[in-house]
Amino acid sequence: MPMSSSAGPATNAVHCCVNIKEIQCLIVEYLQFDPRGFSSLLELAITCTSFKETALDAIWHKQMTIVPLIKVMPADLWMVKSSVALGRQVKSIHFTRIIEPNDWIRFDYYSPRIAHLECINTVFPDDIQVHESVLTAFCAYRPTHPILTNLRSLSIGINMTRFARFLSIFFGASITEFTIRNVSLELAAGELPGLLSSVVQLCPNLEKLTVYCMDLGSFSSPCLASAFETLTCSLTSLQGLTIHFPFSANAIRNAGRLTKLRSWMLILASEIPVDVIPSLFTSTDDCFPDLRNLSLHTADLDYAASIIQSLQRPLQTLLVVAKDRPSNDPSFIMTFTRVFVGHCFISSLTVLRLFVPTVKFQDQDIYSAFEPFFSLKNMAEFTIDNPCVVELDDIWFLAAANAWRHLKKLGLLSDGLPPKATLSGLIPLVQRCPDLESLRLTIVAKPFRMELLEVYNAKMKYIAFRSSPIENPVGVFRCLTKMFPNLPNVTWDGYNEDWQRISALLEESRMDAYVE
C-alpha cells in the first residue's frame, strides 16, 4: 500500500509531461521511424486518448492519394470495382449513390489534417484509382470549396487530360506549393493553359510552382505563353519558379518584378533576339531583387553570357545548359567565362554547373578559358560536362585546390579522348580542401608514390569515374584508401573488370574494418 501512495504523484507527473504538445510531437516523430510504419502511430491513437489528435495529424499529414479519405465516408456510399484497361486489370473507387450532408462528417474530421498530397491518380496495378465520377461528384457538391482546407503542397502526375479539369477542387488560399509532372503534348495544347489560370485565381499565396514537361519538341502555344505571362504577373508571392517551357520576353519582364522570387529555372524562348537580352535582365533596384538561384537553359553561350553579364545579382547557385550549337572555336566559351570576372556574385556564388557545347582547346586556351572561375573564392560545388575537360591536367587541379578552399563537390566529366589528369592530381585537393566529399571525374587512374601524400580526407563519401582508364588496380586501390580511408566504394560507367576489382577490394577493406 505505501508503494501505491508514493506512485500516484510520479504517475501524475508523467501524465502532465505527456500532455505537453511539444513532447507529444517528439514522441510521434520518433515513432514515424518505427519499422512497422504507421501501425505504431495508429495503435497510439487508439489506446491513448491524450495522443489521439497528435498521432492522427501525423498519420494524415502526407498522403499519396485521396482514396483513404474517401473510405472514411459511409461504407454504403462507395465501392471498389475492377475493370480491364489497356490490357491490364485496374481497381477504382466509385460512389454508389448521391452524396448527402451527413456523409461529410468523418471526411471533414480527417481532411484538414492533410497538408501534403503527392498525387490523385496512380498507375500501379495494386493501387486503387479515383474514378472520374467521384471527382465529378466532389466538384458538383462543393464547387467553390476546396475539399482539403489546410492543404499546403500539391504534387500530381498527369498523363491524361481528363483529370486536369478536376484539380480545382484542391485549389485554395492555403496552397503554397504546386507541382505538375509528366505534362504531355496533349495536355500542354489543351488543358494546361486553363489549369494555370485556375491556379492564378484560386491559389493567390502560391510560393513555389513547378511544371515538368515531357519532350515537347518545337511545340509552341500562344495560349500557354499568355498563361505564363499572366501567372508571372499575378502570383506576387512566388519564391520558386521551375517551368519546363520557354519564357517569352513579357513573361521574363513580369518575373523580374516578382520581389520574392529566389529560385528560377529559365528556358529562354528561341525567338528572343540576343540584342534584347540586356533590356530584359539589366538589374535595377526593382528587377529580380531577391534572385539567388538560377538555372539557365539557352540556345547557345552567347545568350547565357549576355544574361549573366546583365543580371548583376549576388547569385548563390548557377546552372547553365547550352547544347544546341557545338563549335570547334574556343573563343565563344572564353567570351562566356570572362563575364565571371568582376561580377557581383564573385563572393556569393558557391555552386556552378555547366553543360556546354563541344569545343576543342589547345593547352594554353583551356587554361585561359577556365582561369576566371578561380576568382569565385567561395566555390563549394563545380561541375562541367564537356569533352574539353580531358585537356585539364594535374597542374589545373593544383590551381583549383589553391583557389577553392571550401570545395565540397567537383565534377569534370567527358567521354571519348584520353584524359591528361591523373590520380596524383587529386593530392592537392586532399591537402587544401578539407570539406571535399564528392568527386565525379574523367582521369587516368594510376598509382602515385605514397610519400607525396601528407594528409588524408576522412569526409569523402562518393567517387565516380567516367571514361577513366586504369593502370595497376591494386596500386590504385592502395592510393584511394590512403587518400580517402572512409570511402565506401567507387562507381564507373560501362563494364570494366579493373574498376570492379577495385570496388571489391574497397568492400573487403570496409568489412575488415567493421570486424575490427
Image (cartoon, rainbow, N blue to C red):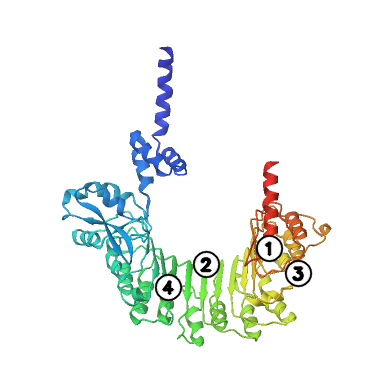
Label 1, label 4: how far apart the Cα atoms are:
37 Å
Question: Would you place residue 228 above or below residue 123 in this image?
Answer: below
Label 3, label 2: how far apart the Cα atoms are:
33 Å
Instruction: Answer left or right for 331 relative to 280.
Output: right
For mark 1, what is the residue? 497
Is residue 257 something that shows in the picture?
no
**Local secondary structure at mark 4:** loop
Q: Residue furthest top?
A: 1
Amino acid beneath label 1: Glu
In this rendering, the label closer to the viewer, 4 or 3: 4
> Crowdedness of circle 2 by 10 Å Cα count: few (<14), some, many (20+)?
some
* Residue 394 marker: 3
The N terminus lies in quadrant: top left
Residue 435 found in image quarter: bottom right
Instruction: Say which label, 2 or 4, has the lower sequence index.
Output: 4
Amino acid beneath label 4: Met
